[in-house]
Amino acid sequence: MSRLAPSARGSRLALLVVGLCWLAVLFDGLDMFIYGSVLPHLLETKTFGITADQAGDLGSYATFGMLVGALTAGTVADRIGRKRLMIGCVTLFSLASGICALSGSVAVFGLGRTLAGVGLGGLLPTAISMVSDYAPRGRGALVIGLLMTAHHAGGILSAYVAKWLVDPVGWRAAFWVCVVPLAFAPVLVKLLPESLSFLVAKGRTDEAHALAARYDVELPAADGKKSAADRWDALLALFRGREWIQTLLYWLASFGGLLLVYGVATWLPTLMRTEGYELASALTFVVVFNLGGIVGMLVAGRAADTFGAPRISAIWFALTAAGVYLLSVHLPMGVTTLVVFLTGVFLNSAQTMIYATVSIRSTPDNRATAVGWTSGMGRFGAVFGPWLGGQLLAAGHGDWGFTAFALAGLSSMVFIGIAALRTARPGARAGVDQELVTAH
C-alpha cells in the first residue's frame, strides 16, 4: 500500500483532531444542558426539598464555575499544555457529574455543579485552539464553526437522556450518563496530539517542526506574549477619552445577551411546563431549540458578512426577544415548535455577533483585550440569568420568566445598536472569526 501524500496525511490528522475535540465539546454540551432537562422533575418531586429559588441558585453555580474556568484556562494551558488541559477538563466535569449523581443534599449537588462548570468553562476555548492549530490551510473558520455545533448537539442529547431515563429510572441516572465521558479521557491521552502553538511557545520547535512536516500542517508563528504592563495598558485604552462609553455599551449588551442565553437554557423546560405543556413536550422543545442553535451558528456569519455584524446583532436580539416573549403565550403545538426553533436560531448567534462587532471595531493591537473583557463581563449575566428565573418562579411569577428574558434581549438590542452608531475603525477585520468564537 502506498504511503499517504502529505496533504492527505494533514487532512487525516485534521479529521482526527476535529473529531476528538467535537466529541469532547459534545460531552461539554450534554453536561451543561442536563441540569435544565432534569430540573422540572427535581421540582415536581421536591428532590432534597428543593425550591424554585434554590434551583435558580444551583443553575448559577455552574455558570459561575464556567466563569472561573474560562478566566483561568489560558494561564493553565500555557503551563501544562492544551492537550493536558482538555483531558483535565473532561475528567473534572465527568467526576463532578458523579458527585451530583451521588449527592444527598442540595449543598453537595451544588458543589458538583460548580466543579462541573469549571471544567466546562475551560474546555471550549482550549478545544477551539486545538482545532485552529490543525485545521487544513484556509479552512480554519469552517472547522471552528463545525466544532461549535457540538455544544448544541450535546443539548439535544441531554433532552433525550432525560426523556429516556428520568421517569423510568430516576434523575440520578441522567447524571451517571454524564460520567461516561470519563472513559473518553484515555482516548484523548492516546490519540490527541499536543497543540502546535504550545510547542512553539515552549521552545520545543524541533518537535513542532517535525509534527507539522509529518502531517503537512502550517506551523503557527511564535506568539509574542505581552507583559503585565502591556496588558494593563491595553485595558486602560478601553476607557481613554470617550472610549469608556463604547466599552460600557458593549459590556452591557454582552451582560444581557448571556443572561438571556443561560437563563433560557436553564429554565426553558420548566417554564414550558408552567405554560401547561407536558414534560415530554417541554423536553422536545429543548431538542428543537438546540437544532435552531446549530442552524443559527451556520448562517449568522454569512449574514454578518453581508449586512454587517452590528446590524445583524441588533436585529437578531430583537427577533430573539419577540420569540422568547411569544413562548409565554400558549399557542398551538406546531406554532410553538416553530417559535422555539427560530428563537434558537437567533438567540444562540446574537451574542456571538456582539463579539464580532467588538472585534471589528477594535484596533488590531487591542482587539484580544476588548473581546476578552466583553466576554468576561457577559459571564456575569450568565450567572445572573439562572438565578433570576428561579426568583421569579419562587415568587409565583413563572409566567413573567419569558417576559423578563425578552426584556434582556431588548436591552442588548438597544445597547449594541447605540454602540454601532459610532464610526467603525477601518482595517480591523483580520482575526475576527477565531476571537469572537473563542470568546463565546
Image (cartoon, rainbow, N blue to C red):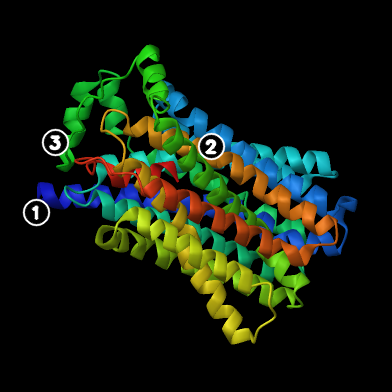
Ranked by sequence position, the earlier of labels 3 and 1 is 1
The Cα–Cα distance between marks 2 and 1, rounded to whole angstroms, is: 54 Å
Element at label 1: loop
Q: Residue at x 77, y 53 (%)?
A: 390
Q: Decide which of tag 2 and tag 3 comes sooner along the chain.
A: 3
Q: Position of residue 313 (x, y in %)?
A: 41, 56
The residue closer to the viewer here, 136 or 427, is 427
Q: Secondary structure at mark 3?
A: helix
At 67% from the left edge and 64% from the top edge, which residue is drawn? 402
| Left or right: where 358 falls relative to 275 | left
Marked residue nearer the N-terminal end (2 or 1): 1
**Disc 3 versus disc 1: distance between alpha carbons?**
18 Å
Relative side of 189 to 66, left or right? left
Badge 3 vs badge 1, beta-carbon distance below 8 Å: no
* Horizontal side, residue 156 vs residue 206: left or right: right
Graded by Cα atoms within 10 Å as few (under 14), some (14 to 19) or many (20 or more), the crowding at tag 1 reads few
Which residue in the structure is indicated by mark 2?
A: 377
Q: What residue is rendered at 34% in x and 65% in y?
A: 299
Report the quarter where the N terminus lies.
Answer: bottom left
Label 2 sits on a secondary structure element that is helix
Label 2 or label 1, whichever lies nearer to me, is 2
Which numbered marker is on residue 213? 3
**Distance of label 2 from label 3 (alpha carbons):** 41 Å
- Count the marks: 3
Q: Amino acid at mark 1?
A: Ser
Residue nearest the viewer, comparing 187 with 405: 405
- Going by the numbered disc 2, the residue's amino acid type is Met
Q: Nearer the viewer, mark 2 or mark 3?
A: 2
Three-letter amino acid code at the position of disc 3: Ala
Which residue lies under the disc numbered 1? 2
Tags 2 and 1 touching, CB below 8 Å: no
